[in-house]
Image: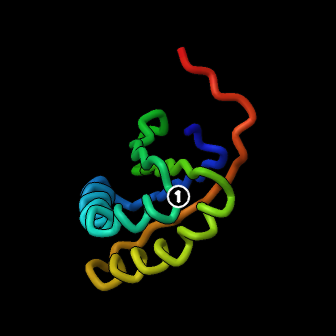
Amino acid sequence: MEPKLVSYITSKFTSKSDMMYAETLWQEVLEEMLPQFKEAGAMRQVVTQVWNQEGSFILGNLWEYVDEQAFIACQPLFREAEAKMGERNGIASINVPSRGIILHDVHL
């Protein structure tokens, strides 16, 4: 099954250590919740570190979903995960979400 909807969220941090620590905590939270995300229709998560902006500490999180309904079904899970993150750290970040419907998917 191919994903039909993607979500890409960038998170900008003030330091590399904050970025790396937040990423480790986020993955710990998600590891506990992955079966729930899968059941809701999430298909894939990819984490990237933006490297072409020197002096910046930015992570990119790409999520792929079966369809728009799966994206909607995952929103309460994200709120739960974000609440767990808030309990575990006080790291500030600027988050910018983008959503898109896949128009072309070229496999090379």
89 vs 42: above or below: below
* Residue at (24% x, 64% y) in the render: 28
- Res 18 seen here: no
- Quadrant position of the N terminus in the picture: top right
In the displayed structure image, the side of residue 9 where residue 5 appears, left or right: right
Where does the image place residue 102, in percent across and percent down from the top left? 70, 39
- Res 73 seen here: yes
Q: Secondary structure at mark 1?
A: loop
Q: Nearer the viewer, residue 32 or 10?
A: 32
Report the residue that reaches farthest toward the top: 108
Quadrant for residue 105, please give it.
top right
| Colouring used for the render | rainbow
Where does the image place residue 2, in percent across and percent down from the top left? 58, 38
* Residue at (47% x, 58% y) in the render: 11
Where does the image place residue 17, in percent across and percent down from the top left? 25, 58
In the displayed structure image, the side of residue 43 where residue 69 appears, left or right: right
Q: Nearer the viewer, residue 64 or 83?
A: 64
Q: Nearer the viewer, residue 99 or 65?
A: 65
33 vs 43: above or below: below
58 vs 31: above or below: above
* Residue at (53% x, 68% y) in the render: 74
Residue position for label 1: 41
Quadrant for residue 14, please give it.
bottom left
How many numbered marks are there? 1
Give the residue type that dot 1 points to.
Answer: Gly
In the displayed structure image, the side of residue 5 where residue 49 appears, left or right: left
* Residue at (75% x, 35% y) in the render: 103
Q: Residues within 10 Å of mark 1 (few under 14, many from 20)?
A: many
